[in-house]
């Protein structure tokens, strides 16, 4: 066991692997969230039905088979890293807020993909600049927080967020 915190040494030794998986998945996720709005911009009602079908199909496959699985893997690997490294610092809470914003952008882009595919030729995609700017801002903020690990102790967090409460979760235990 490592320093009495209950995590086996062999599990702590997997931290570099989890970091690599997290970084690779995050790169694919963010890259996909940058590419998808540009792909959506190609959904022009003026293109031929055959070309529109190809563009719609490739956009849908990119979202469902590449970007979404990468997001899931990035979140799972990141969660493992939080608990394996026992990192519970204010900068991490700020990073998690940016990850939540990235998830909201992910859901918004997915909504646009579905909306456009349900009404081919009638819907125009929104400008790609706002979602791309949002993804770049979130990714840059995440990188700054992770690499600089700024001392955000001066920020005040609610008492319930920073202090263990020692209470049972509000769920009825299963028999």
Image: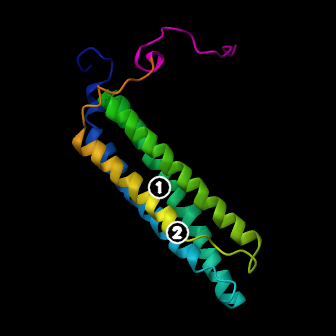
Answer left or right for 136 relative to 43: left
Q: Which residues are magenta?
A: 159-175
**Which secondary structure dominates the residues rendered in magenta?**
loop
Q: Nearer the viewer, residue 131 or 114?
A: 131
Q: Secondary structure at mark 1?
A: helix
Q: Is residue 48 above or below residue 97?
A: below
Q: Residue 28's spot in the image, x, y percent?
A: 41, 60
Give the residue at x 61% y 70%.
Answer: 126
Give the residue at x 24% y 31%.
Answer: 151
118 part of magenta stretch = no
Q: Residue 127's spot in the image, x, y percent?
A: 56, 71
Q: Residue 72's spot in the image, x, y percent?
A: 50, 48
The quadrant holding residue 60 is bottom right
The quadrant holding residue 63 is bottom right
Q: Secondary structure at mark 2?
A: helix
Res. 29 in view: no
Q: Residue beneath label 2, please?
A: 36
Give the residue at x 35% y 47%.
Answer: 142
* Quadrant occupied by the C terminus: top right
In the rendering, which numbered label is found on residue 70? 1
């Amino acid at each position: 066991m490592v320093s009495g915190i209950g995590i086996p040494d062999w599990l702590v030794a997997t931290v570099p692997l989890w970091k690599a998986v997290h970084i690779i998945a995050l790169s694919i996720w963010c890259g996909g969230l940058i590419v998808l709005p540009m792909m959506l911009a190609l959904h022009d009602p003026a293109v031929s039905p055959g070309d529109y079908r190809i563009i719609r199909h490739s956009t849908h496959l990119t979202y469902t088979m590449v970007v979404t699985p990468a997001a899931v893997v990035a979140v799972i690997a990141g969660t493992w890293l939080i608990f394996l490294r026992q990192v519970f610092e204010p900068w991490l809470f700020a990073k998690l807020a940016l990850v939540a914003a990235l998830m909201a952008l992910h859901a918004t882009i997915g909504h646009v993909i579905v909306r456009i595919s349900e009404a081919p030729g009638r819907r125009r995609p929104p400008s790609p600049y706002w979602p791309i700017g949002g993804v770049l801002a979130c990714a840059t903020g995440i990188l700054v927080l992770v690499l600089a690990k700024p001392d955000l102790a001066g920020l005040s967090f609610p008492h319930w967020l920073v202090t263990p409460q020692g209470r049972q979760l509000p769920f009825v235990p299963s028999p």
